[in-house]
């Protein structure tokens, strides 16, 4: 069970972590006194790091995770407030700074809710118990004769009640409950959890008062724009800056060396030439006026078209056997009635969040303060400590709202740039990337080529499955010469696909990284979801079977597969979402002329998702008419938020399927901005229907990412259903299609 210790604000919390079993709070201080008590700090009772209860009744909840539109502040707040029996009108949320005392703050992997929901609920329940205990002592009655409701403790015998704020001072002297005594609510008693809640930040978002990274202003702050080498890891040979220095507002031109991270950690910075100015526009114009001669380095010859050809050739040859393979694949193919082969390609992709990377830093002698839209503030803090030899306790990282992240803002290279420049000019400085910078110098989602070969026996069932993948590994960004996909990448839909197949062989194929590789929303599931679902549709057609029934047959008997996590795979839940989606889409109905429908399923981030897509296609113009998605994500905190996330995933997935690609020529990324790296626009947006399976008694699972991997294969399968044209590579715009 988890343990919640009492924390005194005056003591430095040294150890704090989240484990699979809950929350652990610990302290390391010079004093021998380890028995800390909740504190009254002015008019505030703070029973733990995450809850402040004020004498006026206001409750401040500390959000340790970053808010980037996914609604995490509202979701986790609802969990604490529900168990605390708080009045929502008294709830306020404050963003935590980057600090190890808050545990793992990395906001990615759709894990915020599933990893810290229980601890958040426990802290709310513990605070409620302390308030009840305080009221009971004040009334001189037993605690069992008290209950909490809507910000009051009520005497059940007399109906007398005490406002939470009036209990604050005395509550600070109450012992925190032992972990085994903390009882959480039953699902039927939830007041906020599982309901539709208005976003905590809605007013700030809609009134324009939300503070993003680029909104930060500090007295005497300078602005910086950085010219980086077109080829990854290239360096400056020479620079002519006289024209830039003539621009009004430009104050200085500084060469910034590449900051190389140690092997196995951190992100460093690319380096280049920085233009320092007293406003952003002048900095941007100054950058454009620089004349730089570059040393392009060894990546100058990298060409994505040729690389695709190389990978395609490699996946048709034997690769490294991947653990999890089983059976006799050769015999399955030899005995088969039909054997189907296909190769699938996904290009390099980039995140393109609406808010580009930016950071404000102030390096002052022996301390540093940073303001930035960060998904992983602790890594940024650790990088600063390492690269600039500053004690970590002298580094403050303030997290602003993120205008989208998608994994890009968990890499803190732009923060390192800002700190380096602030140190050089001895003033606060804000580094702002342009959209062109963002597209041309990112950490890219890896390209992949997959080869699949499947056999169908005399009964029309899949008897054998061979799959090879070649993709540059994320590990290459931390450990050069990592030329094969890592185990954790292969675990994202490649080794753990949801099908029950007797003869199953997986192989890993070499793929060098010539760009910076990083995780993007859904990560490798994008590759796996596209290849697996496309191939199953091809197998179903070859077997002359309905794709939905074919998926169900492949999923197999109801079974639960235990693993290392608290979320065992349950095939019945996978079949349930598939059947639900088919029902909602009225699968099997007669479609209008030139229409087609496709289906896809995927298991990712411990969630079960199925998606059906209806398209129309006239004269090679594709229109996505309707998307139906069903998700089983266990306990749902905020239904509206889940729907929003899956609607967003549908649009995100459409952008990848229709338009998404990054290409290089002579080592340089060819794309620049939204005109040549387009997004799904309003005119492309279909009707989207989302259904949530009611499974509130199951642990919560991921929501932000699981909806993305299904969109591309469902669209491509729908196009085949409408036209008989099989799509094995995205984006569709490269396959001769246009879009309404």
Image: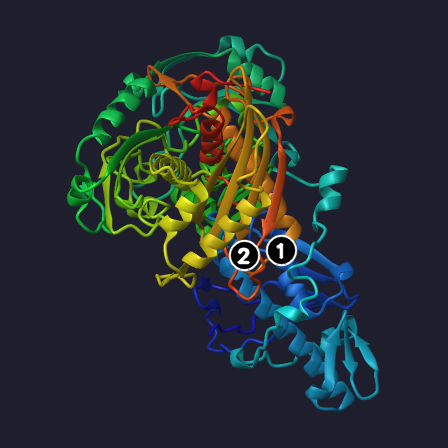
Residue 515 image position (x, y, % from top left): 35, 28
**How dense is the environment of label 1, judged by Cα within 10 Å: few (below 14), some, or many (20 and up)?**
many
Front position in the image: 13 or 353 = 353
Q: Are marks 2 and 1 in contact (CB under 8 Å)?
A: yes
- The secondary element bearing badge 2 is classed as helix
Rendering quarter of residue 129: bottom right
Residue 652 image position (x, y, % from top left): 54, 34
Residue 593 image position (x, y, % from top left): 57, 24
Q: Is residue 527 left or right of residue 61?
A: left
Residue 393 versus residue 122 in the image, above or below: above
- The secondary element bearing badge 1 is classed as helix
State the residue position of label 1.
75
Q: Earlier in the sequence, mark 2 or mark 1?
A: 1
Residue 497 image position (x, y, % from top left): 35, 48
Say which residue appears at 39% left-offset and 40% top-offset. Answer: 545
State the residue position of label 2.
113
User: Which quadrant of the rendered structure holds the C terminus?
Assistant: top right
């Amino acid at each position: 069970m988890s343990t919640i210790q009492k924390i005194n604000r005056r003591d430095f919390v040294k150890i704090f972590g989240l484990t699979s079993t809950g929350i652990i709070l610990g302290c390391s201080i010079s004093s021998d006194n380890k028995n800390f008590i909740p504190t009254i700090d002015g008019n505030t009772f703070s029973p733990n790091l995450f809850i402040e209860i004020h004498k006026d009744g206001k409750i401040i909840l500390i959000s340790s995770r970053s808010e980037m539109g996914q609604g995490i502040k509202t979701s986790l707040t609802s969990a604490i407030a529900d168990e605390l029996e708080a009045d929502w009108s008294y709830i306020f949320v404050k963003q935590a700074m980057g600090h190890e005392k808050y545990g793992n703050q990395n906001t990615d992997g759709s894990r915020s809710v599933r990893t810290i929901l229980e601890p958040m609920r426990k802290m709310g329940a513990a605070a409620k118990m302390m308030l009840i205990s305080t009221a009971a002592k004040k009334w001189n009655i037993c605690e069992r004769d008290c209950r909490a409701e809507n910000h009051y403790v009520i005497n059940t015998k007399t109906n007398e009640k005490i406002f939470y704020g009036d209990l604050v001072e005395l509550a600070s002297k109450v012992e925190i409950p032992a972990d085994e005594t903390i009882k959480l609510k039953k699902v039927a008693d939830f007041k906020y959890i599982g309901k539709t809640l208005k976003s905590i930040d809605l007013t700030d978002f809609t009134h324009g008062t939300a503070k993003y990274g680029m909104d930060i202003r500090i007295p005497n702050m300078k602005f910086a724009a950085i010219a980086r080498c077109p080829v990854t890891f290239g360096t400056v040979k020479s620079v002519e800056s006289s024209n830039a220095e003539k621009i009004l507002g430009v104050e200085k031109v500084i060469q910034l060396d590449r900051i190389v991270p140690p092997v196995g950690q951190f992100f460093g910075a690319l380096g280049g030439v920085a233009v320092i100015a007293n406003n952003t526009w002048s900095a941007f114009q100054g950058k454009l006026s620089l004349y730089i001669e570059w040393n392009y380095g060894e990546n100058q010859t990298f060409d994505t078209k040729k690389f695709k050809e190389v990978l395609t050739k490699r996946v048709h040859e034997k690769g490294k056997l991947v653990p999890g393979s089983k059976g006799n694949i050769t015999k399955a193919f030899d005995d088969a009635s039909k054997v189907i082969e296909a190769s699938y390609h996904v290009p390099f992709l980039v995140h393109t969040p609406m808010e580009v990377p930016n950071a404000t830093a102030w390096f002052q002698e022996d301390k540093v303060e940073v303001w930035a839209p960060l998904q992983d503030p602790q890594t940024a803090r650790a990088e600063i400590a390492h690269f600039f030899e500053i004690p970590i306790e002298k580094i403050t990282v303030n997290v602003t709202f993120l205008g989208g992240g998608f994994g890009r803002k968990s890499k803190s290279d732009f923060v390192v740039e800002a700190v380096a420049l602030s140190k050089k000019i001895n003033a606060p400085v804000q580094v702002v990337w342009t959209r062109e910078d963002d597209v041309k110098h990112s950490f890219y989602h890896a390209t992949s080529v997959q080869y699949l070969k499947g056999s169908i026996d005399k009964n029309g069932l899949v008897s054998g499955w061979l799959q090879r993948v070649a993709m540059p590994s994320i590990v290459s960004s931390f450990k050069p010469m990592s030329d094969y996909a890592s185990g954790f990448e292969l675990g994202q839909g490649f080794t753990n696909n949801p099908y029950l197949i007797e003869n199953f062989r997986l192989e890993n194929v070499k793929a060098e990284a010539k760009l910076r590789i990083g995780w993007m929303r859904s990560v490798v599931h994008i590759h796996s979801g596209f290849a697996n679902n496309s191939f199953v549709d091809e197998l179903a057609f070859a077997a002359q079977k309905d794709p939905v029934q074919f998926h169900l047959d492949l999923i197999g008997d109801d079974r639960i597969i235990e693993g290392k996590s608290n979320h065992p795979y349950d095939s019945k839940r996978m079949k349930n979402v598939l059947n639900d989606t088919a029902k909602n889409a009225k699968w099997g109905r007669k479609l209008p002329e030139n229409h087609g429908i496709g289906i896809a399923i995927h298991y990712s981030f411990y969630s079960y998702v199925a998606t059906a897509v209806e398209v129309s296609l006239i004269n090679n113009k594709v229109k996505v008419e309707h998307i139906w998605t069903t998700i089983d994500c266990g306990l749902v905190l905020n239904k509206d938020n889940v729907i929003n996330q899956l609607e967003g995933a549908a649009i995100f997935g459409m952008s990848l399927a229709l338009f998404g690609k990054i290409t290089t020529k002579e080592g340089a990324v060819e794309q620049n901005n939204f005109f040549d790296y387009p997004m799904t626009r309003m005119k492309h947006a279909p009707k989207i229907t989302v259904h949530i399976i009611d499974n509130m008694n199951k642990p919560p699972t991921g929501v932000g990412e699981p909806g993305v991997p299904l969109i591309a294969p469902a669209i491509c399968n729908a196009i085949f259903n409408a036209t008989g044209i099989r799509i094995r590579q995205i984006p569709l715009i490269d396959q001769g299609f246009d879009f309404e």
